[in-house]
Image: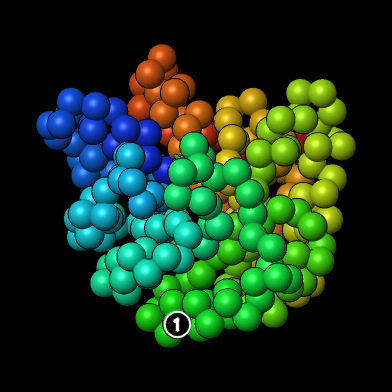
Amino acid sequence: MTKLSVNINKIATLRNARGHNRPDLLQAARDIERFGAEGITVHPRPDERHVRYQDVRDLKAVVKTELNVEGNPTPDFLDLVREVRPEQVTLVPDAPDAITSNAGWNTIEHQDYLHGIVAELKGLGCRVSIFLDPVPELVRAAAATGTDRIELYTEDYARHYHADREAALLPYREAAQLAQQLGLGLNAGHDLDLDNLAYMAQNLTGLAEVSIGHALVCDALYLGLENTVQLYKRCLSAVKN
Ligand SMILES: CC(=O)[C@@H](O)[C@H](O)COP(=O)(O)O
Ligand SMILES: NCC(=O)COP(=O)(O)O
């Protein structure tokens, strides 16, 4: 079954709002794992607007499932993951001032660059995933970097889901099939929520992991964190109807 990695960036956003430690990010991570998540994802951005670099160091000792650290492989980010050695590193080509992740890698143009980073991170014992759009040529070029997995950038799927979910998912299904043929592991994330998750999980072959944060934390404000984590898990276990 597809694993749920909960992105706790937005819990850190709330924590930072008052300059104190409430909510306690580390306790939230422990609780989210206890509620059933199979991973914790963080995306420490250069401006530390939410998850701070020290949070990542502290989470390494706290997370008992898998720690997935996302980010643009800047020198500071690489120094952090060299120090922390999380179970998974997801490479994302974000600009420092991006309001959120808004693009996947051009793995054709950056293939040599990514190849070197992938080799180093795998050498540290980290699983590596590359964030990209569901474009066959990009998937093929990602495989040539030696990455363990790709993460399909699902904003477009989420945007078009309600209009025509079958059409919205089609490029992702094709990319997933190609990834499987190329021996790439498959993750997915960005803007997934309680409306659109089950259909993707039921129809994307070989989907190993989804990382979900913004919608999940928003839902938890109304539904409670434990209940919300379990609702997202239920979407991943729903049988295709
Ligand atoms: C890579 C991706 O799509 C998201 O995981 C990203 O981490 C979200 O970042 P924000 O929480 O800063 O919007
Ligand atoms: N990689 C996607 C992620 O970690 C969370 O994205 P979102 O659910 O906050 O959009």
Q: Residue furthest top?
A: 222
Q: Measured along the vertical axis of the image, is residue 115 above or below residue 233?
A: below
User: Quadrant location of residue 14?
Assistant: top left
Specify whether tag 1 is near ligand 1 (CB below 8 Å): no
Q: Position of residue 62 (x, y in %)?
A: 22, 54
| Secondary structure under the numbered disc 1 in the rendered image | helix
Give the color scheme: rainbow, by chain, secondary structure or one colour.
rainbow
Q: Position of residue 70 (x, y in %)?
A: 45, 56
Residue at mark 1:
120
Give the residue displayed 50% in from the left and 77% down from the top.
117
In the foreground, 231 or 21: 21
Q: Amino acid at mark 1?
A: Glu
User: Quadrant location of residue 75?
Assistant: bottom left
Would you say 171 lies left or right of 120 here?
right
In the foreground, 54 or 74: 74
The number of numbered discs placed on residues in the rendered structure image is 1
Q: Is residue 72 visible?
A: yes
User: Quadrant location of residue 200?
Assistant: top right
Would you say 27 lies left or right of 90 here?
left
Give the residue displayed 63% in from the left and 49% down from the top.
103
Q: Position of residue 88 (x, y in %)?
A: 44, 65
Would you say 78 lies left or right of 240 here?
left
Give the residue displayed 60% in from the left and 43% down from the top.
102
Q: Position of residue 187 (x, y in %)?
A: 60, 56
In the foreground, 82 or 3: 82
Q: Quadrant of the C terminus?
A: top right
